[in-house]
Amino acid sequence: MTFDPFGDFEARGYLRNLAEEKDPAIVRRLEHASFTTGIDDAFAALQKKKTLTYADVLITHKTLFEAMYPWAGQDRLQTAPNIAVSRGGILFAHPGYIQNAIEHALKLGNDSNTMREKPGEVMGYLAHGHPFLDGNGRTIMVVHSVLAQRAGFSIDWASTDKPAYLQALTKELDDPGKGILDKYLKSYIQSAASNLKEHIAAAKGLDGSTGDADTIRGSNDDPAVQAEYKQQQLKRNAQSRSA
């Protein structure tokens, strides 16, 4: 089923892309072209910032995908505030809590000691926020790579197995702060990359050709969805208290 949060796929194409394209293969190529065109400017902007903020994440997405989507740089609180988005059975943050989720990840990631000790946990919290309707993985990888470089290391993304990585990430999202993704990434930690563009370009699956697609779980007004959000938050709060 096509991910269609705006409800106008037939009239305006996938997520109202500027080309009004509907063919998934063409959409992936256009997204990847936008990403590779914007990545130099995205890294240049991030590297000027002493401390990364939520606004920097939004600007990074805009820089990477503004050639593709008119809403690039706008989070789900702006683009789709009334729907719950999930993937692989995992519910992402409520639109109203996206900023809090990302800011928590950045609080950890901006601390070099924490970033070195828990790169997977930082990635997990970034992924839980899932701010955008598309382009989340690539945006987060760019931000995460800058945080890692500042902490004196890089993840050898080119050597990771994308299905295995996504499986570990899914488990991290479902059970945060238990070191699941940290354990997976441990063997891929290397010296800090000097050229982050080349480093990221070597990662597998950045063209969106693999992995599950987002789905609409339902309306945020649905009591069942609200109950799931509440259960998710209770679980995450409990983990935060025990950390």
Image (cartoon, grey):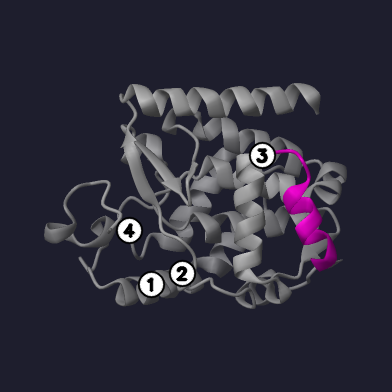
Q: Is residue 151 left or right of residue 57?
A: right
User: Label 2, label 3: how many angstroms apart (C-alpha)?
Assistant: 25 Å
Q: Single out the mark in the foreground, 3 or 4.
A: 3
For label 4, the residue is 69
For label 2, the residue is 208
Q: Give, as a three-letter code, the residue at label 2.
A: Gly
Q: Which quadrant would the N terminus be assigned to in this image?
A: bottom left
Residue name at image x 67 percent, y 49 percent: 123
Judging from the image, what secondary structure is the residue with disc 1 in?
A: helix
Is residue 187 in the magenta section?
Answer: yes
Judging from the image, what secondary structure is the residue with disc 2 in?
A: loop
Q: Give, as a three-letter code, the residue at label 4.
A: Tyr
User: Label 4, label 2: how many angstroms apart (C-alpha)?
Assistant: 16 Å
User: Label 3, label 1: how many angstroms apart (C-alpha)?
Assistant: 30 Å
Relative to 173, say whether 104 is above or below. above
Residue name at image x 48 percent, y 28 percent: 229
Which range is magenta? Answer: 176-189
- Rendering coords of residue 203 (x, y %): 63, 73
Q: Is residue 95 left or right of residue 166?
A: left
Q: Earlier in the sequence, mark 4 or mark 1?
A: 1
Residue 148 seen from this side:
yes
Asked whether the residues under the numbered discs 1 and 2 touch, taking CB atoms below 8 Å apart as contact, a structural biologist would say yes
User: Label 3, label 4: how many angstroms apart (C-alpha)?
Assistant: 32 Å
Nearer-the-camera pick, 25 or 239: 239
Q: Give, as a three-letter code, the residue at label 1.
A: Arg
- Rendering coords of residue 41 (x, y %): 55, 64
For label 1, the residue is 28
